[in-house]
Image: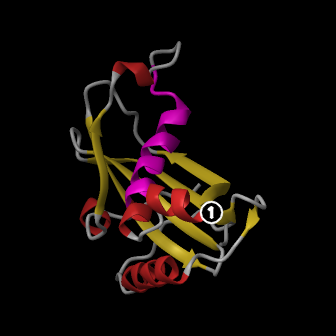
Amino acid sequence: MRRIRTTLAEIRQLELAHRQMIPAAYLDENQHVNVQYYVHLVEKGLVTLFERAGLGETYAAADEYGNFALEQHIRYLAELLVGEQVSVYIRLLELTPKRAYFMGFIINDSRKQLASAVELVQMNVDMRQRRGAPYPPAGAAALQALHARHERLDWSAPVCGVMRA
C-alpha cells in the first residue's frame, strides 16, 4: 500500500462537507471507532454535496430518485478517538451520466492529521424501477461544474487504482 502524500492544505482546497465530534456511541467492543462510522462520516459529507447540487432529500422525494453505493475502498491512516473533532472533505474524481466516483477525506482536526481516505462509486437510481438512471439535467450540470473545479486542482487524489465510475 502506497503512503498518502496528500497534505491537509491540499485537501482543505475542497469545500468542507461535514464536521463533528466523535461520540462514544461510535465505539465497538474493542473501544475502537467501528469501521461503519468512517463510512458514515463520509456519507454525511456526500449528503451535503448532493444537497448543494440539488440532488438531496427534496430531489429524492419529488422525483423518486436516489443514490446507491456500488463500491467502496477505505484506508485507515490514524485512529479516531472519542471527543476528537473531525472534518470531511469530498472530491469528485469521475462522473458519467449515471455514476460518480468520489474520494472522501476524514481529517482529525484535534490532531491535525489525515485519519482516513474513503473512495466510493455511487449510482443515481430510479427508485420506481430500482435501476440506474441518468442524473436529471440540473443535478448533472451541478455535478459537472463540481467535477470541473476538482479537475483543476494541482494535486492528484491518492486513489487505490482499481475503481472507476
Which residue occupies the foreground of this view, 132 or 37?
132
Q: Which quadrant holds the C terminus?
A: bottom right
Q: What residue appears at the point 65 percent right and 65 percent down from the top-left corner?
A: 123
Q: Position of residue 103 (x, y in %)?
A: 49, 62
| Disc 1 secondary structure class | strand
Q: Is residue 42 magenta?
A: yes
Residue at left 62%, top 62%? 122
Location of mark 1 (residue): 121
On screen, residue 153 versus residue 60, left or right, reads left
88, above or below 145, in the image:
above
* Count of numbered marks: 1
Residue kind at label 1, given as amino acid type: Val
x, y percentage for residue 77? 44, 44
Q: Is residue 5 visible?
A: no
Q: Which residues are magenta?
A: 32-48
| Main secondary-structure element of the magenta-colored stretch | helix
Residue 115 seen in render: yes
| Picture layout, residue 82 above or below residue 154 | above
